[in-house]
Amino acid sequence: MSHFEISKVILIYMFVHRCTGVRVMEGIDLSTTQTENSDGSDEAKTGDSFGSDDRMEVSDSQDESDDEQCTMFNGKPYKDLELDDLSNVVFKSVEEAEMFYLHYSVAKGFSIRKYKLAWNSDNTVIIRREMVCAREGVRNKGKKNRVCEEDVEAGLKDRLIDKTKKANKQKVLHRSDVKDSERSCRGKKMVKPVSSRSRRLSRQKCLAQFTVKYDRKKGGYYASSFRTEHNHPLTRLVHRQFMRTNRLVKEHDIAQVNALRKVSIGTARAYEFLVHQAGGHEFVGFTIRDLYNRVQEENNKLMLDGDAQCSITWMNMKAIRDPMFYCLFSVDVKGRLANMFWRDEQLYTDYCSYGDVLIFDSTYKTNMYGKPLEVFVGVNNHRGTVIFGSALLVDETEETYNWVLTAFLASMQQKKPVSVITDSDEAMRKALGNVMPEARHRLCAWHVGKNVVSHLKDASTRGHVTH
C-alpha cells in the first residue's frame, strides 16, 4: 500500500468517527461489541445500530481502578487531604512523593514547582525535598537590564527612543539599547527601562507547599509540612487538563504522530486525529503547542545525532589529509558520543617546542550541545598563545578528566609538561594527581584575583591580598 493510500484510509477513518460521534476506546472493537439480553443470550450489536442520541458505555475494571488511584489516596479524595492524613504515610523515594503531590495538585486545581533539594554530607542521599505552588513568591526584580537616568533623558541620540505614553506619561527605553548604555553608566543613577511588552504576573506569594524529609529508621520519606491554603483562585474542573503540570506528551503519542508524519500528515492534522481518538480535547492530555514542542525536541535529537556522525566523518577526512592528525572519542552506554579529543600536526609541533608549561582550562557549556570545551594552551617564546589540543567532554568529573588527560598524553607520545596551571577545580586537581603526578600544579593568577574580588568586600583587605 502506497503512502497516498495510507493517508486516504486515515483521513476516511477520522471523517467517519467525526460524523458518528462514537468515542473510540483503546482495545475495544465497537463493530462487534457483545450485549447481553434479558434472557441471558448474547447478541452481536454492530456500529450501524447506534443512533445519533445513543451512547455506548464500556466499563473496564482496570481503568476504574486507575481512575480511583488518581482521585483517591488511602480511601480519601486527594483534594480533602490534610497533614494529619499523612502522619503514617512513608514514601519509598522522592519520586514517589513528587508523584503524590502532582496527583494532589491536579485534583485540587493548581500547578506545582519543585523548589528546594537538600543532600546529606556525602551527597549520596536526598534528605529533604520541598515542592510549592507555581504561584509561590514574587517575580525576581534583578539589577540587570538597567540604564542610567541621564541616558534616558538624553536619548543616546538615535539609538535610545524617548516616547511618552498617553496614559501614565512614562519614559520608554527599548531593551535592545540597554547594552549600549551600560558602558557609559558607571557611577550614575540607574533606572529600569519600561518594556513595551508586559508579561502577566504569575507569582502571588502563595504559601501552599509540601515538604518531605528522610527518616533512616523508617527507610523512606515522611511529610514534615503540608500547607493546603491558597491565596488565589484555583483552576476549574473543566480547565484542569490544560494546567502545566497536567500536560504531558507520552511516548506512544509521539510515536503515533511520527508515524503519521511519515505519510505526509502534518502535526496539526495528527493532533486532530488524537483528539478524535481520545474523545475530546479534555482526554488528550496536552495541547497542540505541547505537541509542536515535543516534535521539535525529537527533531533536535536527530540533528544532534547527525552532527555527531558528521564530526566523526570530518575527523576521518582530516586524518586522511594529515598523517599526524590524532583524534580519540568515546561513547556512552546508549551509544551516543560522549567525549572527543583532537589535535593536528601543527599543534603537536608546538607542544614539542613549548610544552613545558601547560594551561588546562575549560569553558562551561557555551555551545548548543551543552558540552564543556577543554582547551590545552601554552605560551611560545614571543609570549603568544598557542593551542596544543581541544576536547569536548560529557561532564566535568574526575573520571572524565582522567580520560582526556590520558588521551592528551597518548597523542603527545607521553611527553609530560613540567608545570600545569588550572583554575582550582577540585576534579581537575585530582585528575592531574592521577595522570601527571610529577607535574607542578599551579593556580591561575587571574582566577585567584577574581575570587578575591568576589569574596572579599572590603577594599583595603583586597589590596593587601593582591599586593
Image: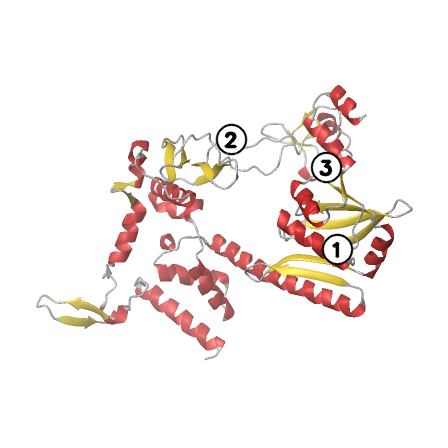
Amino acid at the residue labelled 1: Leu
Question: Which numbered mark, 3 or 2, is in the foreground of this view?
Answer: 2
Residue depicted at x 36% and y 43%: 100
Q: Is residue 242 left or right of residue 466?
A: left
Quadrant of the rendered structure where residue 106 is? top left
Q: Report x, y in % for residue 90.
A: 34, 40
Amino acid at the residue labelled 2: Val
Q: Is residue 328 left or right of residue 260?
A: right
Name of the residue lying farthest toward the front = 438
Q: Is residue 145 left or right of residue 387?
A: left
Name of the residue lying farthest toward the left = 39
Callout 1–callout 3 Cβ contact below 8 Å: no
In the rendered image, the quadrant that contains the C terminus is: top right
For label 1, the residue is 409
Q: Please tell me how crowded label 2 is: few (under 14), some (14-19), or many (20+) other residues with Cα within 10 Å.
A: few
Residue depicted at x 75% and y 68%: 317
Q: Report x, y in % for residue 133.
A: 43, 36
Q: How is the image coloured?
A: secondary structure
Which of 355/319 is in front?
355
Q: Report x, y in % for residue 393.
A: 66, 53
The image's mark for residue 179 is: 3
In the rendered image, the quadrant that contains the N terminus is: bottom left
For label 2, the residue is 138
Residue depicted at x 66% and y 54%: 403
Number of numbered tags placed on the structure image:
3
C-alpha gap between disc 1 and disc 2: 52 Å
Quadrant of the rendered structure where residue 338 is? bottom right
Callout 3–callout 2 Cβ contact below 8 Å: no
Amino acid at the residue labelled 3: Lys
Q: Is residue 354 above or below residue 443?
A: below
Task: State whether residue 392 appears in this view.
Answer: no
